[in-house]
Amino acid sequence: MNQTSQAITIYCTTPDTETASRIGTVLVSEHLVACVNILGPMRSLYHWNGVLHDETEVVFIAKTNALRQSEGIARIKELHPYECPCIVVLPIIGGYADFLEWIYANSLDPLKK
């Protein structure tokens, strides 16, 4: 199996840096993802419950393997303060093979290694 082809990113918006850091720390600590990059602040415009919002948010991008996708999404949802958080998965279609292998190796369940 080509482990590099299983690399994915999980993109998620949060209300602030503290929330992104808290969720990211849990994801990495539990080996659900290999690493998390926290970006922000940024401006988000969106409709919610019929109201146009103009908010400041912080994004995190988690790198993991596709085998951990469902668990990662579930854990983010569990920890996230939003009713309907933006959690989307984006494939990684290529990159530096050694780094992609590192993502795979560092996002495995340590009990199943």
Image (cartoon, rainbow, N blue to C red):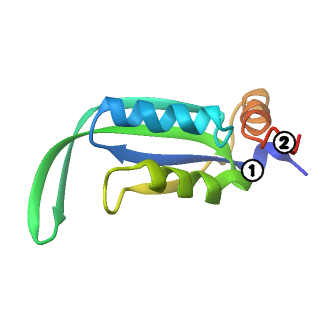
**Disc 2: CA contacts within 10 A as few (<14), some (14-19) or many (>=20):** few
Q: Amino acid at mark 2?
A: Leu
Which mark, residue 111?
2
Q: Amino acid at mark 1?
A: Gln
Label 2, secondary structure: give it. Answer: loop
Find residue 103 and report its horizontal and vertical position in percent. 71, 35
The residue that appears at 63% across and 32% down in the rendered structure is 29
Identify the residue position indicated by label 1 in the image.
Answer: 6
The residue that appears at 32% across and 30% down in the rendered structure is 17
Quadrant housing residue 19? top left
State the CA–CA distance, disc 1 to disc 2: 20 Å
Q: Is residue 75 left or right of residue 8?
A: left
Rendered position, 50 above or below 7: below
Find residue 81 and report its horizontal and vertical position in percent. 33, 50
Find residue 43 and report its horizontal and vertical position in percent. 19, 41
Rendered position, 97 above or below 11: above
Label 1, secondary structure: give it. Answer: helix
